[in-house]
Image: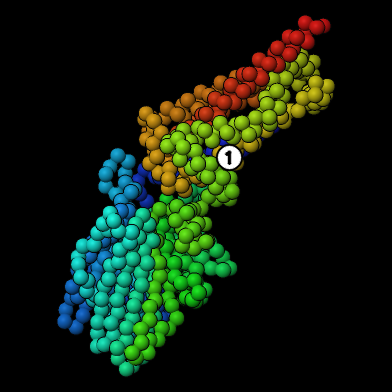
């Protein structure tokens, strides 16, 4: 039995090591940026083979016209959850902050999401391209706005920011619609053709990012996905790493769908009209190290004297399944819980329900741990009863070893015969560990992906359940609880195996030092509950044995 149990612990240790390795790669001591040179597919600002105009950092920061430099007037937009800056050149969002998400723990400044700064260039842009404007292949439109500051007042549910472009009878309004409490922004172009000639053009939307953190090279991809993703009828959620983007150009037609750039906890998404077909494309500029992912509509024709609207929805915010589900049914898949997603979804659902009552994610984790322990109580009881019987057999096992000497085959046969005679399942003690492994991995994914647990405090020194314990108190307590649990378990008659089993708590403690404290909290509470249950069953079994001896 101890050999089997050792194998289970070794397997679990291997999984812990894989998670620990991925976690360390996700959070290195210094930021590692992608510096490898890749082949240029298209230079931003140059027309792609499909005819899509890709807007570059250079175009955003310096757009020329016949009369010199186009004026960059910045418009500030503030809602209850967003702080956004729109550039009138191109009418694009060049700065964005998420007001309800601090950049760092115990700091008031919100996290910066979009930025047109060279060192962390990350923007979402859209274009209405035509030979007659507003945007052309080589120049972005110069829009005008009524105000330079738009603020959502407490009594407003939604707010519109209207940018206008007018040239020789063609009037284009680029309208941004912001809604209270929401991170999705509707971007709509209203095209009014007052001329006698047809206006012809197309709509394009892109996400661009620079200086991407290099992906983990670990064989075990347990770390949060950072990269691109697109959705189609054939593949509702297709993940594309930045490395793959640099090597292979996306060039396909998709009915509706969406495209996104993802990182841990947050993402940006363009969701076009579902009933239209779009051409999806990508490009990489090695000179500026910019990754571009975009979509382009079919030809748009507005007859003279007519009007038409075209646009898309931009989401730039936290990965919250309910928010994403409202935009597109497949968008919630970006909350990527990995291959044990069904367990992770159930665990988070249960934790969230408890959190709404308790108001603390740490106590929610503890409550879920207790509920899981109750759910598997009978299984654990059977296993611990088997372990208790195994412990009672220790004297007989020692006698067998003395009788069989170094003949391992004879000892193995005698041991199995003793188990059969005493009606003991030698694998019974391994079942609780086997059951815990999927739950452990599922909770790991929840802590890795659920933005609700980002910077979530527990109590005392634990102020972020998604980060490691700053003082390593929880991992040490977990190691001590595991050591105590080992003492309550039957010891192997093989001295070497017994020493290895007693050394495991030290190994696990080292692994858990860098794990998110919420995960360590779960394992610590689970160990403590297992110790209480095992102690109770051992005591009950001792009473049964004493009663049986008294009757004899």
Image quadrant holding the C terminus, namely: top right
Mark 1 is surrounded, within 10 Å at the Cα level, by few (under 14), some (14 to 19) or many (20 or more) other residues, namely some
Query: Which image quarter: residue 500?
Result: top right
Which residue is nearer to you in this view: 243 or 317?
Answer: 317
Outermost residue, front side: 155
Q: Is residue 215 above or below residue 86?
A: above
Can the viewer see residue 219 in this picture?
A: no
Disc 1 designates what residue?
439
Query: Which image quarter: residue 7?
Result: top right
Which residue is nearer to you in this view: 4 or 404?
Answer: 4
Outermost residue, left side: 67
Residue at x 53% of width, y 41% of height: 350
Residue at x 30% of width, y 51% of height: 99
Q: Is residue 336 above or below residue 256?
A: above
Image quadrant holding the N terminus, namely: top right
Query: Which image quarter: residue 531?
Result: top right
Can the viewer see residue 352 in this picture?
A: yes
Residue at x 37% of width, y 58% of height: 183
Residue 542: image location, x then y, percent: 70, 13
Outermost residue, bottom side: 196
SS for dot 1: helix
Q: Is residue 355 left or right of residue 499?
A: left
Which residue is nearer to you in this view: 362 or 497?
Answer: 362
Q: Is residue 194 left or right of residue 357?
A: left
Q: Is residue 409 left or right of residue 243?
A: right
């Amino acid at each position: 039995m101890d050999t089997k149990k050792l194998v289970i612990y070794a397997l679990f240790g291997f999984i812990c090591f894989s998670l620990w390795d991925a976690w360390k790669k996700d959070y290195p001591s210094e930021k590692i940026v992608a510096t490898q040179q890749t082949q240029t597919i298209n230079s931003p600002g140059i027309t792609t083979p499909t005819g899509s105009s890709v807007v570059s950092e250079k175009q955003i920061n310096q757009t020329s016209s016949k009369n010199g430099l186009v004026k960059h007037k910045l418009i500030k937009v503030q809602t209850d959850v967003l702080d956004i800056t729109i550039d009138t050149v191109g009418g694009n969002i060049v700065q964005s902050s998420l007001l309800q998400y601090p950049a760092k723990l115990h700091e008031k400044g919100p996290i910066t999401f979009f930025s047109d700064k060279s060192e962390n260039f990350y923007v979402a842009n859209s274009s209405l391209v035509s030979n007659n404007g507003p945007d052309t292949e080589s120049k972005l439109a110069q829009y005008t706005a009524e105000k330079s500051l738009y603020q959502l007042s407490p009594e407003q549910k939604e707010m519109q920011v209207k940018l206008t472009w007018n040239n020789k009878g063609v009037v284009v309004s680029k309208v941004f619609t912001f809604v209270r409490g929401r991170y999705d922004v509707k971007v709509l172009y209203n095209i009014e053709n007052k001329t006698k000639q047809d206006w012809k053009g197309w709509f394009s939307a892109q996400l661009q990012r620079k200086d991407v953190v290099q992906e983990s090279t670990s064989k075990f991809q347990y770390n949060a996905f950072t990269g691109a993703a697109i959705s189609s009828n054939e593949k509702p959620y297709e993940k594309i790493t930045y490395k793959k983007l640099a090597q292979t150009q996306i060039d396909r037609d998709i009915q509706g769908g969406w495209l996104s750039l993802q990182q841990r906890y947050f993402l940006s998404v363009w969701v076009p009209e579902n009933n239209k077909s779009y051409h999806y494309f990508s490009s990489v500029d090695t000179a500026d190290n910019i990754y571009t992912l975009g979509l382009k509509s079919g030809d748009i024709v507005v007859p003279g004297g007519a009007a038409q609207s075209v646009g898309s929805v931009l989401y730039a915010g936290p990965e919250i399944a309910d928010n994403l589900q409202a935009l597109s049914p497949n968008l919630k898949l970006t909350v990527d819980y990995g291959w044990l997603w069904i367990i992770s979804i159930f665990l988070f659902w249960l934790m969230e329900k408890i959190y709404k009552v308790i108001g603390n994610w740490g106590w929610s984790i503890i409550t879920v741990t207790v509920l899981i322990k109750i759910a598997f109580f009978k299984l654990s009881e059977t296993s611990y009863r088997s372990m208790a019987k195994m412990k009672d057999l220790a004297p007989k096992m020692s006698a067998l070893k003395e009788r069989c000497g170094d003949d391992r085959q004879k000892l193995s046969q005698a041991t199995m015969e003793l188990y059969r005679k005493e009606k003991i399942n030698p694998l019974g003690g391994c079942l609780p560990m086997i059951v815990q492994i999927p739950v452990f991995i599922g909770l790991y994914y929840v802590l890795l992906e659920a933005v609700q647990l980002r910077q979530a405090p527990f109590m005392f020194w634990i102020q972020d359940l998604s980060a490691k314990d700053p003082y390593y108190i929880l991992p040490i307590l977990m190691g001590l609880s595991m050591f105590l649990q080992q003492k309550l378990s039957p010891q192997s008659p093989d001295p070497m195996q017994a020493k290895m089993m007693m050394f495991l708590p030290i190994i696990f403690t080292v692994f858990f030092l860098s794990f998110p404290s919420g995960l360590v909290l779960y394992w610590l509470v689970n160990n403590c509950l297992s110790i209480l249950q095992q102690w109770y069953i051992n005591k009950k079994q001792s009473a049964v044995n004493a009663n049986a001896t008294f009757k004899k």
